[in-house]
Image (cartoon, grey):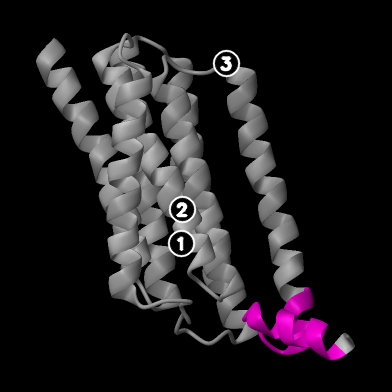
Amino acid sequence: MGGLAFDIAHLLAGGLVLVSFMMLYQDRLYALLNIFALHALVLSLSVAWQAFIQDAPHLYITATIALGFKAIVIPVALHRIIQRLGIHREIETVIGIGPTMLAGMGLVALAVSVMLQVTPEADPLAREDLAFALAVVLLGLLTMVTRRNAVSQVVGFMSLENGLILAATGAKGMPLVVEISVAFSVLIAFIVIGIFLFRIRERFDTVDVSALDQHRGDRR
């Protein structure tokens, strides 16, 4: 069972990294939101498996929160925001898809190299999960900095937070109070982000963040 547990945990954590690459590749908003829902689904499966092999029932709550809020509620709500705002469905990128994917592969290699070197005495399963989690965090940051659209940057931020949850669960779980606070933080952040997007659209008639830089230049 030990070998099978390791293989399945490795598969799910690696799958989360793969879905992060799929998010980097997307150039349309609806497809990006669908991939983010898949990202949250894989995260919930990974956390549920960790709950099983660690015999930590409280982690099932984390998996349920990830499945309910991140895989269903948030993507559906963002779909409605995009429709209501009439946001352009294509995502403008700072650099091309090819260089972005190459940068992503470099970040994954860096994450694995660094994490395996700084945790030589840790449990092998925890080391693998932490390495994959760091890769997911770095890919989330890359998604944020290579996209001009505010909605895609929000999705990148939430995928980054998925990596943090994977790291916390891989490191033998986290207290229930932390899970609840994370869930409420995500919910509150989502409400604030929705208001923020409406205000940007109202003021600049676009959610392309480059418009903010142009406006700031005009003010000067």
Which circle's residue, 1 or 3, is located before the other in the chain?
1
User: How far across and down, in percent of the image, does residue 177 sit?
Assistant: 64, 20
Amino acid found under the numbered disc labelled 3: Pro
Q: Quadrant of residue 113?
A: top left
Mark 2 touching mark 1, by CB under 8 A? yes
Quarter in which the C terminus is drawn: bottom right
Quarter in which the N terminus is drawn: top left
**Residue at x-position 31% and y-position 46%:** 108
Q: Residue furthest right?
A: 219
Question: Alpha-carbon distance for marks 2 and 1?
Answer: 5 Å
Does residue 180 appear left or right of residue 138 in this picture? right
Q: Which residues are magenta?
A: 199-218
Amino acid found under the numbered disc labelled 1: Thr
Q: Give whichever of 56, 158 is nearer the camera.
A: 158
Question: Alpha-carbon distance for marks 3 and 2?
Answer: 24 Å
Q: Which residue is mark 3?
A: 175
Does residue 181 appear left or right of residue 215 in this picture? left
Helix, strand or loop status at disc 3: loop
Amino acid found under the numbered disc labelled 2: Gly
User: How far across and down, in percent of the image, does residue 90 sit?
Assistant: 44, 84
Does residue 18 appear left or right of residue 213 in this picture? left
Q: Which-is-in-front pick, marks 3 and 2?
A: 2
Report the predominant secondary structure element of the magenta stretch: helix
**Marker disc for residue 140:** 2
Helix, strand or loop status at disc 2: helix
